[in-house]
Image: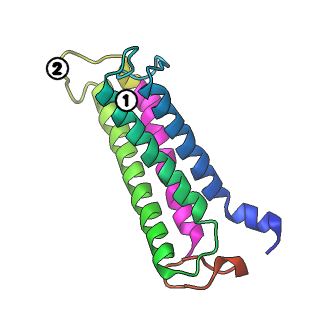
Amino acid sequence: MTRTERHGRYLPHYASVVWALLFAALSVFWAFGGRTGAHPLETDDPTPLFTLLNLGAALLKAGIGLAAWLATRQWRSRAVRGLLALVLWTSGVVCAVYGLFGVVGNSLVLAGVVPVEGGVSHWYWYYVLLWDPYWVLGGVLLLATALRSGDPRDTRASGTGRRMF
């Protein structure tokens, strides 16, 4: 396998890493009071719990990115390959489903189909146009990473051009 072929094969992996690290960086930014104006939970004066939860979310997101990167490596251990496959498939499905439910649910609120107490705020637009699609994008990238990483039934090493998982 040439270097170009290898990089093309791992394109979903690298895109997943970038997606996860950008998302993790945003959580760190929020944890310390950063404001973008695009999320209703942003605060200038974060509580210790808010900071802790955002830093925990950042670690989780960075961990997903790490799993995507590790899936580009050759692993002889079936347990490691299985764990990476589990992380990629699970996180991909969770992110995609969460984002899809968000897009549909928030769109129904904006369309007036689902009433909300207190009326519709502008934040629903941010969710429909920014946050929910970002979750869907991550889910798609992670699922593509899992698919490109290989067939769980083929345990040959990826360095030989064969399947990783």
Q: Nearer the viewer, mark 2 or mark 1?
A: 1
Q: Residue at x 61, y 58 (%)?
A: 13
Checking the image for residue 51, the label placed there is: 1
Label 2 Cα crowd, 10 Å radius (few <14 / some 14-19 / many 20+): few
Q: Nearer the viewer, residue 105 or 17?
A: 17
Residue 106 drawn above or below residue 142: above
Q: Is residue 140 visible?
A: no
Q: Which amino acid does label 2 sit on?
A: Glu
Q: Quadrant of residue 54?
A: top left
Check disc 2 and report its element: helix, strand or loop: loop
Check disc 1 and report its element: helix, strand or loop: helix
Label 1 Cα crowd, 10 Å radius (few <14 / some 14-19 / many 20+): some
Residue 77 in the image: state x and y as whole percent.
53, 80
What segment carries the magenta color?
A: 126-150
Q: In this view, does 6 lie to the left or right of 54?
A: right
User: Which residue is disc 2 drawn over?
Assistant: 117
Q: Is residue 7 left or right of residue 51?
A: right
| Residue with the most extreme front position | 48
Residue 129 in the image: state x and y as whole percent.
47, 30
Label 2 vs 1, first from the N-terminus: 1
Q: Which residue is drawn at 54% across and 67% down?
A: 147
Residue 111 in the image: state x and y as whole percent.
31, 26
Q: Does the magenta stretch include residue 120?
A: no
How many tags in the picture? 2
Q: Quadrant of residue 52?
A: top left
Q: Which of 165 and 5 is in front in this view?
A: 165
Q: Main secondary structure of the magenta part?
A: helix
Q: Residue at x 48, y 67 (%)?
A: 84
Checking the image for residue 7, the label placed there is: none
Residue 99 drawn above or below residue 48: below
